Amino acid sequence: MTAAVFAAQSGAKTAVIERNDKVGRKLAITGKGRCNVTNNCDVDTIMKNLPKNPRFMFSSLNAFTPADVMAFFENEGVPLKTERGNRVFPVSDKAYDIVDALHNKMKKLGVKIINARVTEVLAENGEVCGVVTDRNVKIFARSVIIATGGMSYPVTGSTGDGYTFAKALGHTVTALKPSLVPLETPGGCAEMMGLSLKNVTLTIKEAEKKKPVFKEQGEMLFTHFGISGPLVLSASSVMGVITPGKYTAYIDFKPALDAETLDRRVMRDFDERKNMQITNGLRGLLPEAVIPAVLKAADIAPEKKVNVVTKAERARLCAVVKALPLMITKYRPIAEAIVTDGGVSVKEIDPKTMKSKLISGLYFAGEIIDVTGFTGGFNLQTAFATGRAAGISAAEEVSRDVPRAGMRA
Ligand SMILES: Cc1cc2nc3c(=O)[nH]c(=O)nc-3n(C[C@H](O)[C@H](O)[C@H](O)COP(=O)(O)OP(=O)(O)OC[C@H]3O[C@@H](n4cnc5c(N)ncnc54)[C@H](O)[C@@H]3O)c2cc1C
């Protein structure tokens, strides 16, 4: 939609071909229906929040910064507000206001919306010439922008069709995997299910690697299948293919306490609860639901009396409170992921114009490109910036173009 707006604004006769009866179905569910439209920060910070191919985004982000995106929507009558972590939302808390703003802008600019599913992108002699739809209609065009999104939440229409088109046109599509997705643990975390923790540190270690692949403090939650929440989603975007034994998550329940301080705190608690079972003795320190898992990992019987806990047991207990290990078995399915990691190789796309380096007249925009962001509005900012670049350059190409033989419309 952004690509269409900027193409039309630059003078091109523009059509959006959308398989759903409504545009922006995924956009409408973003940010839990509130749409975290961008992040109110500078371009450098945006790039730091793109774990995959940030440098590719340098030009397009500088040409359409978060401030520009915010100005764009405010000019279209959507007042915005900035919340914790610089996350930007419509004041109305309604993602539909963002969808409507783009939809209305397209209407004002005369963008035609064709409700059909594209089945093929046509090209001849290395030049794009249009698309074919599922009604077997050929739509001729001098420029085609593929902005079909990723393949997560397929009910929204993003089923990964664009990857097939790109491959058929000779483009490389890098390995696709879920990103910003919950993680599964053996047998799930049923006993802790529903527990949400605010100030914990999550560390993800990869077997045989010294440096953790992820370490951050924040919020996470336990579910019947494993772990989820903001920290976990972010961790998933820096992890590779999961194989048995490759990744282990460690949860530090007391990141503010170093080992010595924690030990002193445990001794004090134990002193006050001498005659209790250890399960009850730990209630001041930990949420009730995690105590069984912590005791199991520390190999201490839950019914053991506090006053007979040995020094070695206390040391094991403190170690587990600082790093409860959870084996990661797999990602949740891609259908549940916020974004798809992987996509059309950035080596084959010009970073200023989003133009294909292989097929003339072909452009890419949005999540189909092999760029992913963390949560916080970074994925939409990327989609807007690449959409704008593709729209403007596709329109420029059309205006420069000499009519091609056989082109009907
Ligand atoms: C639950 C959820 C919450 C999210 N929240 C946020 C958030 O708050 N902030 C943020 O920055 N990001 C968020 N994201 C990520 C963000 O929504 C996407 O990265 C973004 O929508 C990508 O935009 P896009 O235009 O590339 O693709 P999409 O938004 O997926 O749009 C692609 C469009 O192409 C259409 N299409 C696909 N194939 C065809 C075809 N063959 N023919 C015709 N039409 C076709 C689809 O129907 C769809 O309308 C969220 C994602 C999810 C799933």
Image: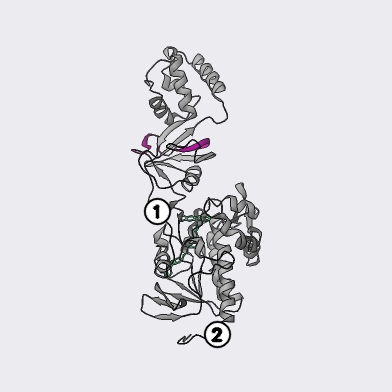
Dot 2 alpha-carbon crowd within 10 angstroms: few under 14, some 14 to 19, many 20 or more: few
Nearer the observer: mark 2 or 1; the answer is 2
> Which residue is depicted at the point 48% across and 23% down?
318
Dividing the picture into quadrants, the one containing residue 265 is top right
Q: Secondary structure at mark 1?
A: helix
**Counting residues from the N terminus, which is met first, the one under dot 2 or under dot 1?**
1
Answer yes or no: is residue 4 visible.
Answer: yes
SS for dot 2 = loop
Residue 192 sits inside the magenta stretch: yes
Q: Answer whether residue 87 is visible to the viewer in this image.
A: no
Q: Residue visible at 60% across and 47% down?
A: 85
Q: Amino acid at mark 1?
A: Ile
Residue 337 x/y as whole percent? 43, 52
Q: Magenta stretch: residue 121 in it?
A: no
- Nearer to me, 198 or 237: 237
Residue 197 screen position, x and y as percent: 50, 37
The local crowd at label 1, few if under 14, some if 14 to 19, many if 20 or more residues have their Cα within 10 Å, is: many
Q: Give the answer, above or below, for where 209 lies relative to 153.
A: above
Mark seen at residue 103: none
- Quote the CA–CA distance across marks 2 and 1: 43 Å
What is the x, y in percent for residue 56? 56, 59
Left or right of 53 on screen, residue 337: left
Residue 250 vertical placement versus 133 (above, below) = above
Q: Position of residue 160 (x, y in %)?
A: 40, 63
Q: Over which residues does the magenta segment extend?
A: 186-206
* Mark linked to residue 334: 1
Q: Which residue is mark 2?
A: 402
